[in-house]
Amino acid sequence: MRDISLKPTTHRTARAEAVLRLSEATVARVRAGTVPKGDALATARVAGIAAAKKTPDLLPFCHPIPLTHADVTFEVREREIAVTADVAAVWRTGVEMEALTAASAAALTLYDMLKPLDDALEIVHVRLLEKRGGLSDMAAGGAEPRRAVRAGILVASDRAAAGTRADRSGKAIAEILGGYPVTVAAPVIVPDEREAIESALLRLADEERCDLVFTSGGTGLGPRDVTVEATRAVVDREAPGIADAARGFGQEREPRAMFSRGIAGIRGRTLIVNLPGSPKGVRESLAALLPALLHAVPMIAGEGHGE
């Protein structure tokens, strides 16, 4: 089973279809409600909904998912019954297997109930019709910008600036951004001095004209943690939802994330985002923010939502 602990929770939906082929006489019995075993469609609907909930018990690599919706509907045709299963959840992984399982179970239930009447029953296919939600849907919906994005990285650390400790958080940011259409400059490392941090932010925003600037370090409660104050001094407008999303995502995994004072804000056409100083905190924060954060770039540039 894959580790999905760093995937964001999003609204997921899926629709699947199964088609049962049968004789016209059997279709007539289904329509008339004279199937010997009872109401075939009603029973198949219940079976499909129950199967959606039991998917991880049947398929070993499926995660247990708290479903928020599951339903099965039917279209009775001349010589076919089309089964449609719709499933939804607000969770970290998709629900396509739940929809496929629901459609399959409903079709199998129809087969079981109708087999005394029809020797030529055939489940023609089971297929996924659509799925929505998750990171791929964010990109498809316009989260990725229509041009390459330039990103700057600023690491605030006394020890990294002095060369007594290797920079790992800045490298982690660059590595993660490498998976997106983002041009990343080498991390800039400065000591935990407000003036040095402000100067570096101004250079990255005003001179290098970065679309995004990620800072790492200096967001905690220590006396040398001044990155937040430096950031607030240079931004024109804050974007509190960004920092809240990263903090909330992190706190689900590490209670000490509550100590982060990080902010996000806009200077000109540059979005500055404070990240924690640890590689783990960086990975968790970017897991919460990407790729959706790239959607901010065209918005800041006045290009609307980039759709």
Image (spheres, helix red, strand yellow):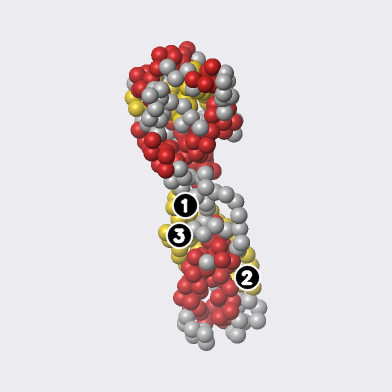
36 to 24, vertically: above or below? below
Q: Secondary structure at mark 1?
A: strand
Q: Residue at x 55, y 76 (%)?
A: 110
Q: Secondary structure at mark 2?
A: strand
Q: Which mark is residue 67?
A: 3
Taking the image as drawn, is residue 210 in sight? no
Q: Secondary structure at mark 3?
A: strand
Check disc 1 and report the residue beneath it: 91
**In the visual, does 77 lie left or right of 301?**
right
Q: Residue at x 52, y 44 (%)?
A: 6
Image coordinates for residue 141, horizontal then vertical, percent: 48, 40
Mark 3 or mark 2: which comes first in sequence?
Answer: 3
Amino acid type assigned to the residue bearing label 1 in the image: Trp
Distance from disc 1 to disc 2, alpha carbons, whole Å, reads 31 Å
Q: Is the residue under label 2 in contact with that under label 1 (CB below 8 Å)?
A: no
Taking the image as drawn, is residue 279 in sight? yes
Name the quarter where the N terminus is drawn. Answer: bottom right
Q: Which mark is residue 123?
A: 2
90 to 270, vertically: above or below? below
Mark 3 or mark 1: which comes first in sequence?
Answer: 3
